[in-house]
Image (cartoon, rainbow, N blue to C red):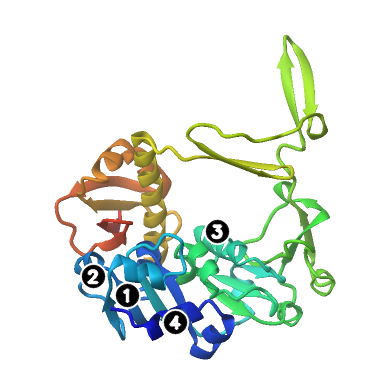
């Protein structure tokens, strides 16, 4: 059961002041919480009885069994999902050697929490381990940022410092920045170490930081604002100025537009799409296991996944696809997987064992 004071405390973690004073952050949902448990000390965890029964070995200073209604009152999400937890903020030491020895990201005054979370998630996917933020960049422990990382915060270390001072400390290390007058990035050789600077959503990279960048790049738009049609052997070019985009309700789709931007999201999930989605998620999770296990990028692996009625059909259908994506030489289903890594999905769990071939 959650007291009113405990619910008030959880809600207070929406405020940067409280998070800074308490040195904690909030995470919600089975996947995100599962990724963070064991990575960061957990001060408090609240979960439904079914989730707790499925995870009997949880390590936390305080654990509360709650009803779905109680969880809804405490949650900051519109749709609470079984579990929320309060974790201690990690303390990292920043070193110029990070950028000298590997490729790192630098964020100059990013303001949107969701954007920061998405950047962390993408950095995690591409194996970038360090992100260096300006002091005015949005707080990484904002609940919206944490949720948007989808667990990437467990593997990507985020630092806050003066970007000009940090760049000065790098010496002749490559410092990349994206500008409209830069060189086409698809035509330029990129090093395996250095710093990639990304600027503010509205104003780009600040002048002080811009002056320290030694490699200016340009990311071109594709397509370049036009589309070419071939009609009976003759080309017809349609440019953005020639068309007007508008949206309307489409059965099975969620459509929204703002200005020139239109987004259409298919909301009907067929059985085929469900299987494909599971396969893609397994690829993501297995890639994370590869990284956390310290495998080299070229290492071949053997994969064993515990049998589950909700995933067996997807594993069988997309067996070759999964193996190709993660450099797997084999992918087998087993009734029991020993020494496996537990993967938490919304309403079930799997065990996966990954070994070097």
Place of residue 43 in the rendered image (x, y in percent of width and height, measured from the top left): 37, 84
Q: Which residue is drawn at 37% across and 55% down?
A: 286
Separation of disc 3 and disc 2 at Cα? 31 Å
Of the two numbered discs 1 and 3 in the rendering, the one whose residue sits closer to the viewer: 1
Does the rendering let one see residue 175? yes
**Local crowd size for mark 3, using a 10 Å CA cut-off: few (<14), some (14–19), many (≥20):** some
Observer-nearest residue: 119 or 163? 119
Q: Please report the residue visible at 37 percent of the width from the left and 35 percent of the height from the top.
A: 270
Sort mark 1 into few (<14), some (14-19) or many (20+) by Cα contacts within 10 Å: many
The residue indicated by pointer 4 is 8
Label 1 secondary element: strand
Q: How crowded is mark 2: few (under 14 residues within 10 Å), some or many (20 or more)?
A: some
Mark 4 or mark 2, earlier in chain? 4
Marks 3 and 2, the one that precedes in the sequence: 2
Q: Foreground mark, 3 or 2?
A: 2
Q: How far apart are marks 1 and 3 (CA)?
A: 29 Å
Sequence-wise first label, 3 or 4 = 4
- List the residue tagged with mark 1: 46
Which numbered disc flags the more N-terminal residue, 1 or 2? 1
């Amino acid at each position: 059961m959650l007291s009113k004071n405990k619910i008030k405390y959880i809600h207070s973690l929406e405020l940067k002041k409280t998070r800074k004073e308490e040195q904690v952050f909030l995470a919600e949902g089975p996947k995100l919480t599962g990724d963070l448990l064991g990575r960061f000390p957990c001060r408090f965890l609240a979960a439904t009885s079914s989730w707790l029964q499925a995870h009997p070995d949880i390590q936390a200073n305080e654990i509360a069994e709650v009803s779905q209604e109680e969880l809804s009152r405490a949650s900051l999400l519109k749709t609470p999902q079984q579990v929320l937890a309060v974790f201690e903020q990690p303390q990292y030491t920043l070193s110029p050697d990070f950028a000298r020895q590997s490729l790192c990201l630098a964020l100059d005054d990013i303001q949107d929490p969701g954007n920061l979370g998405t950047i962390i998630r993408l950095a995690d996917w591409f194996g970038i381990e360090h992100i260096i933020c300006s002091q005015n960049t949005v707080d990484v422990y904002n609940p919206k940022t944490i949720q948007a990382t989808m667990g990437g915060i467990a593997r990507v270390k985020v630092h806050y410092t003066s970007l000009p001072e940090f760049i000065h400390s790098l010496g002749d290390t490559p410092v990349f920045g994206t500008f409209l007058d830069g060189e086409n990035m698809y035509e330029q050789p990129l090093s395996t170490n250095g710093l990639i600077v990304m600027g503010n959503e509205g104003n780009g990279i600040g002048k002080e930081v811009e002056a320290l960048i030694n490699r200016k790049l340009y990311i071109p738009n594709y397509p370049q604002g036009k589309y070419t049609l071939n009609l009976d052997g003759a080309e017809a070019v349609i440019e953005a100025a020639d068309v007007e985009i508008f949206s309307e309700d489409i059965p099975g789709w969620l459509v929204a537009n703002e200005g020139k931007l239109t987004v259409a999201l298919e909301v009907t999930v067929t059985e085929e799409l469900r299987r494909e989605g599971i396969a893609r998620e397994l690829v993501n999770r297995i890639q994370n296991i590869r990284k956390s296990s310290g495998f080299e990028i070229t290492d071949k692996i053997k994969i064993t996944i515990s049998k589950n009625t909700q995933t067996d059909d997807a594993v069988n259908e997309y067996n070759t696809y999964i193996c190709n994506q993660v450099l797997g030489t084999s992918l087998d289903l087993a009734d029991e997987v020993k020494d496996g890594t537990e993967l938490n999905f919304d309403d079930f769990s799997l065990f996966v064992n990954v070994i070097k071939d």
